[in-house]
Image (cartoon, grey):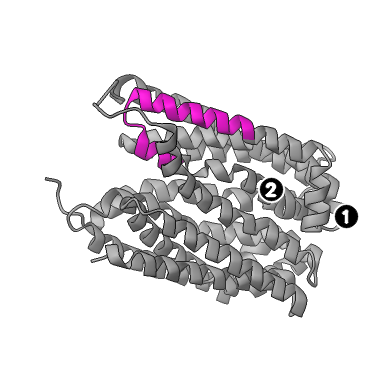
Amino acid sequence: MSEPVDLARVRRTWWPLAASWMLMGVELPLVSAHMARLAEPEVSLAAYGALVFPICLVIEAPIIMLLAASTALCTTRARYAQVARFMHAAGAALTALHLLVALTPLYDLIARDLIGVPPEILEPGRLGLLLMTPWTWTIAYRRFQQGVMIRFGASRAVGVGTVVRVVTLVTALQVGMRVPGAVGIAVGATAVALAVSAEAIFAGWAVGEIRRERLPKSDGEALLTLRGFLGFYVPLAMTPLLTLLIQPIGAAAMSRMPRDLESLAVWPALHGLVFLFRSPGFALNEVVVALVREPGGQAALVRFTRILGCTLVGGLALLALTPLHSLWFAGLTGLSPELAQLAGSVLILAVLMPGYQAFQSLYQGILVARGDTRPVTEAVALYLVLAAGLLAAGVHLDPGPGVAVALGCFTLAGLAQTLWLARRSRRYRV
């Protein structure tokens, strides 16, 4: 019988994954900071924040939950091979979709007609999207391999891979900064593509020992059926897909509100900072799935979530309510004084996001551990519908800068999502 779960064990399980998430959270601020110091900064920042990054995220959404699928299902070499075949098929299909969007009139339909970005960022956005072609397949491969690492107790290798990614990113950005006449969107997108590729290569190397020495040939489990795999995976895959759809919807709304170009330009820096504070909460999800059904697990996880949520909200509030936000946006991120002032003035609207993210991971992890994934999809659908409705109202009512309206809408929708998860997971909580 395993030892009862306490706060120390939760912390030991959580911190390598949290460190990995936080290092990934550094990526967007790093890219924004370098693009802000290159040619055409506002156009490049707006193109990356409104087009390249959101479109890439939506295209990759179906493979994001490969981490959870691999962790849960890759128990033998045969099952590893089965999930690997799905990963490569999905990666190839989504990469083809990525190129279809970037190279055909479909791009104009999405960027100009649906999102409605300012005309000056259309072609820079197309260039950035083309340079990001490796994004989806390499991330599918990396998350698949990382799931195997986590399953077999090698979660620290996940953090090492993230360090490889960040070092590659910084190196590529620094090289790009030294190219005469380099445009920010080209440097930023190229650096990100190289970084995710390097991390995928490392993940493939790091999992080699597990595959050879620790992954059993068979443990008596039957092979996965297609129906069984899809029944497990599709509800999980819908969660990030619906969540990420709000990114281009948000960009489209900001494009139709006051100070559209400024709002789109500050969005990468704001999103990156808030993501950094939400990252420790994201990492909690797999920890809950792993520990919640062990003796003492639920009580320790609830206590840890409360401590984590309050700490993260307090940290972001300190940044939002003091001159520290100017140091971040104007100093570290490199935004112009006008853009830094706009970003700092609206940051307070996001202060609850890190807190509710921790509780979302707690409730979602409880549901997934019980095999009840439908409420997770329901909660995300509620978030999408509510956020889209509030954004539409914002466009109609025209209450102020688009970035302020977007942050407020996302916060309210996220709170509703958290409350729904709390309600639907209540029957599984002691």
Identify residue type, mark 2: Ile
Does residue 36 show up?
A: no
Task: Identify the amino acid type marked 1.
Answer: Pro
Specify the segment rendered in magenta. 67-93
Label 2: state its secondary structure: helix
Would you say the magenta stretch is mainly helix, strand or loop? helix
User: 76 or 225, which is in the foreground?
Assistant: 225
Res. 121 visible in picture: yes
Disc 1 secondary structure class = helix
Q: Position of residue 294 (x, y in %)?
A: 20, 52
Camera-side residue of 149 and 98? 98
Tell me the residue at 38%/46% (across/down): 16
Which residue: 48% across, 61% down?
378
Residue at left 24%, top 55%? 8
| CA gap, disc 2 and disc 1 | 17 Å
Q: Residues within 10 Å of mark 1 (few under 14, many from 20)?
A: few
Name the side, left or right, on which 384 lies relative to 178: left
Mark 2 crowdedness (10 Å alpha carbons): few <14, some 14-19, many ≥20: many
Nearest the viewer among 141 and 195 is: 141
Instruction: Tell me how many marks there are.
Output: 2
Depth order, front residue of 206/182:
206
Q: Is residue 326 left or right of residue 200?
A: right
Q: In the rendered view, would you say 299 is above or below 49?
A: below
- Residue matched to label 1: 119
- Magenta stretch: residue 77 in it? yes
**Residue 222: image location, x then y, percent:** 30, 28
Q: Which residue is mark 2?
A: 55
Q: Earlier in the sequence, mark 2 or mark 1?
A: 2
Q: Residue furthest front?
A: 227
On the image, the x and y values in percent for residue 272 come to 60, 56
